[in-house]
Amino acid sequence: MIAAGLWIAGRVWARQADLFRIITIQTPADSTLRVPDAIIGQSIWDVNLSSLAERLKAQQPALKEVRVIRRLPNTLRVEVVERAPVAQVKLGAWHAVDRSGYVFPESSAAPVEGLVVLDGVTGPGQPALKEGREHHQERLQLAFRVAERLSRSPALTGHRIISLDVGDPNQLLFVLDDRLEIRCGSETELPEHLGRLQTVLQRVAANHLSVRYIDVRFPEPVIGPKVS
């Protein structure tokens, strides 16, 4: 009982002590986030960190995350996590998207070099993608999962993924390097089909073949030569 009483008394003292009244709020350099002036002078223990972080993030939805951290005795530190584009979609113009499905408002007239083009995530029967918002529809998430698996596949080591089409989830299609089209089955079949693809790509490289497409949906993959 004595220990509990001392603990309660200590908490009351900490909330009231001038030592723990906020005098400094640290924000990232060049940040335009505005912390309410009323925070200054409050006890550092009375500030709801998660609630304040949500209010700050609402000021800049383009941020992936905002964190508020106590730095005793009297400082709050605001940290931000920027979004990182992982692919791009065409919504009239080209827009980058991050892994959480956030569509960046900035656009370009042509695809951005180095970002995978996602096809088949919009169109008839699919929810529209809107700039400045996160999206979690299944077709977009499918594209993210497949793109991630392709990027980790030993079959594609040394190759660059240009685009990925998930318009038909049972017949995935992606393009490598110099417009080499790869035709696969569904997401669940992908590990098996990538195994076939690895063998075919090795054969193509060894024989210096000029190939337009490779269809690995069949036990004996179909290779389509480039037309001169």
Image: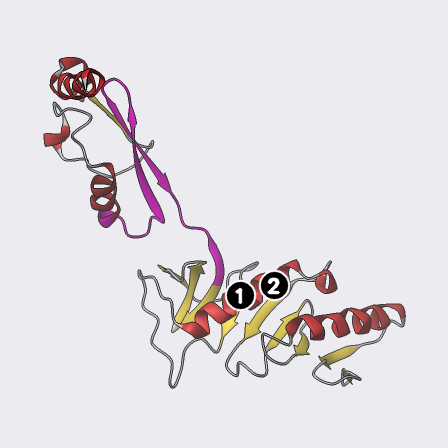
Alpha-carbon span between mark 2 and mark 1? 6 Å
Q: What is the quadrant of the C terminus in the image?
A: bottom right
- Describe residue 33's horizontal placement relative to residue 82 as left or right: left
How many neighbours does mark 1 have within 10 angstroms: few (below 14), some (14-19), or many (20 or more)?
few
Residue type highlighted by circle 2: Arg
Mark 1 highlights which residue?
145
Residue 172 x, y percent position in the rendering: 59, 78
Q: Nearer the viewer, residue 218 or 61?
A: 218
Q: What is the quadrant of the N terminus in the image?
A: top left
Task: Look at 14% across and 30% down and name the residue there.
Answer: 39
Mark 2 highlights which residue?
149
Residue 89 x, y percent position in the rendering: 45, 69
Q: Nearer the viewer, residue 178 or 221?
A: 221
Task: Look at 52% across and 83% down and name the residue there.
Answer: 168
The answer to whether residue 33 is above or below residue 71 is: below
| Circle 1: element type | helix
Residue 182 x, y percent position in the rendering: 67, 77
Q: Which residues are magenta?
A: 58-87
